[in-house]
Image (spheres, rainbow, N blue to C red):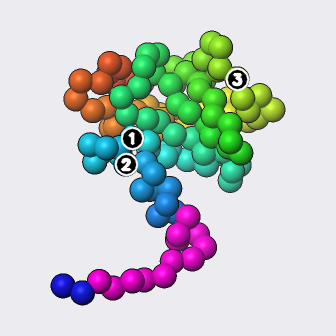
Amino acid sequence: MSLIRVPLEGPLEEELELLLAQIGPDGYVIKHMVSLVDGKLKVEVRANEHPPPHFHVVYDGEDASFSILTGERLPNVYGLERYEKMIHLWWKQNQGKIISKWNDCRPTGCPVGPVRLP
């Protein structure tokens, strides 16, 4: 079998690197991107998470966690404070989408189970 190399550049290369970085040692995806807020803040839910059910917002080297149920920042979590109002507004409009993604990515034995829509 011969190896074929296909050069990747730009957005396709970046997207592939992001996808590969999200695969854990067991071969399962550990991060699931939900959306982009304002085209730059990446919203993620992650497998095998700790309670309470929450989502992460990642941008510019910062990672902050917010409750799926209330949209509020988790206690003792810092970062992205300047975007908090924008994140909360996005959460109000997309809570169902976050809950769906959270429930879809719960692996067997996850310490935090599915979330019901309020």
Tag 2: residue type? Ile
Give the mark nearer the N terminus: 1 vs 2.
2
User: What residue did someone put label 2 on?
Assistant: 23
Tag 1: residue type? Ile
Residue at 51% from the left image edge and 77% from the top image edge: 8
Q: Residue 30: which quarter of the image?
A: top left
Q: CA distance from mark 2 to mark 3?
A: 26 Å
Residue at 32% from the left image edge and 18% from the top image edge: 111
Q: Are marks 1 and 2 in contact (CB under 8 Å)?
A: yes
- Indicate the secondary structure of the residue bearing disc 3: loop
Tag 3: residue type? Tyr
Q: CA distance from mark 3 to mark 1?
A: 22 Å
Residue 100 appears in the figure: no
Tell me the quarter of the image containing the N terminus: bottom left
Q: In the depicted view, which residue is nearer to us: 72 or 58?
A: 58
User: What residue did someone put label 1 on?
Assistant: 30
Q: CA distance from mark 1 to mark 2?
A: 6 Å
User: What residue did someone put label 3 on?
Assistant: 78
Residue at 55% from the left image edge and 47% from the top image edge: 35
Residue sitting farthest toward the left: 1
